[in-house]
Image: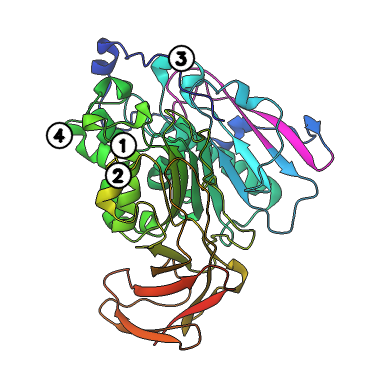
Amino acid sequence: MPKPIRSPLVALPLALLLSQPLYADVTTDGPDPSLIAAPQQATQTGDWWKFYSGTMDIDANDYYDPHNVDFKWAYARREPLPPDPRIFVHMHGSGGGEGWMQVFGPSPQGDIEVRTQDAEAFSPRWREWWTIGADGTPYPGRRIAASLDFLTQRYGIDVSKRGIVLGGPSMGGAGSVAQTMILPAPWREYIAYSSALSGVIMPRQIAARDPEQYSTFPPDTLANKALWDSFDFAVQSQTDPIVRGMHYRHTFSSNDPFSAGVNRASTLLLFVNLVEEQKIGGAFSWVQEGHSYYEDGVNLPNMSVFESPEQDVTLDRAHPAITRSTGNFPPRAAQRTNQKKYPRGHYNMGITWDHANILDDDTQIVFPLKYTRRVNLGKGIPDQPEKITVSVTPRRARNFELRDGETLKWSWDNGALTGVATVTGDTVTADGIPLVSGDGYRTLRFYR
């Protein structure tokens, strides 16, 4: 389980905050790859992995951090590396910045796992929440980008097909969502999907209840509106093409005290509703266990990872954004935010796809889809129904062009059900697609 946030949320001294520009890049240096290092020989090896302990000699370079300190970073890779390795960026939770640098093997979510540090590793006063520093500069993302530059150059990795994966627990879960909005170019466009555990991911909505939780950020004032907008999912999910094309996976608790908004409402459930409202890809499960993602007596899967080995999301083909599933619990958005009546639930659980057989060419998009119900979920969560319907929206099409205003055809299960749908902006959706638990993969085809 992720390490709970235990260190006090200490405010920066007011004089320090007032001495810094609130929304300006005050750095005088630029990126310097020569400052990022890791040994050629592994620091430690296992039967199938190699671990490398690196350094960021950045105390004199304020592009990466303004505190005049050096940072650690580390990575682990599979041995041997596959021909097209994927990088998993793992961000630590609060209090984990030093322990996270100890020897580890790569996550199953990637062939190379890389870890850097939030400035909180040195002091709670410097906590960046994997987002921004006290002057509004996105330092954590710059350090992540530096590690990605290093790894792709050392191993000759092309990330344009499989993409990179962002993940982490607690504060690291915050980063796995925030960085989909603010990771420096070109790396943001190479994010395949985001995977979070107990993440604290809606800062503006949380700060509306408790500004002290984000006292290490510039205040959310009119002067800083653009800054806060840049990492506000409620804003970016409406218009940002990378966010709208993302796939988000998250397991959390509905009564997480660090994610509570106004009137203690769960901002994590607000996030789920925004994903569905904007027809963005995602899958979620939630318990009622404070700052955790596991609850005794509840048998929900960890939805931060894929439910099936056939599932994946990559950059070289479209992926399906599933919405309005009648297999969700609770089934409607308004019910979802009623935490008193529905403290536990799930979204898109049991719905999988066969990534290898997705077609995305200039004539069609084809998604092989399948549904497997789950039962005996515990603590008042009902068994999933045997039959459900879903809506399906293609996201991040690589070859099939979506033209605003054009009417497309769709066909389910070789013509068993057909229909038409009109493209609105970047979105076209086939509604009422029937899925039956126990059936094999059936295909949904979009075409002209």
Q: Amino acid at mark 4?
A: Leu
Quadrant in which the N terminus is drawn: top right
Going from N to C along the chain, the mark reached first, 3 or 4, is 3
Judged left or right of residue 201, residue 162 is right
Going from N to C along the chain, the mark reached first, 2 or 4, is 4
Q: Which residue is mark 1?
A: 266
Residue occupying the point 81% across, 34% down: 45
Going from N to C along the chain, the mark reached first, 1 or 4, is 4
Residue occupying the point 50% across, 52% down: 193
Q: What is the secondary structure assignment of the residue under circle 1?
A: loop
Q: Horizontal and vertical percent for residue 3?
A: 53, 25
Q: Amino acid at mark 1?
A: Ser
Q: Which residue is mark 3?
A: 123
Q: What is the secondary structure assignment of the residue under circle 3?
A: loop
Q: What is the secondary structure assignment of the residue under circle 4?
A: helix
Q: Nearer the viewer, residue 238 or 132?
A: 238
- Which mark, residue 270? 2
Mark toward the viewer: 1 or 3: 1
Q: Horizontal and vertical percent for residue 201?
A: 37, 38
Question: Crowding near pointer 4: few (<14 within 10 Å), some, many (20+)?
Answer: few
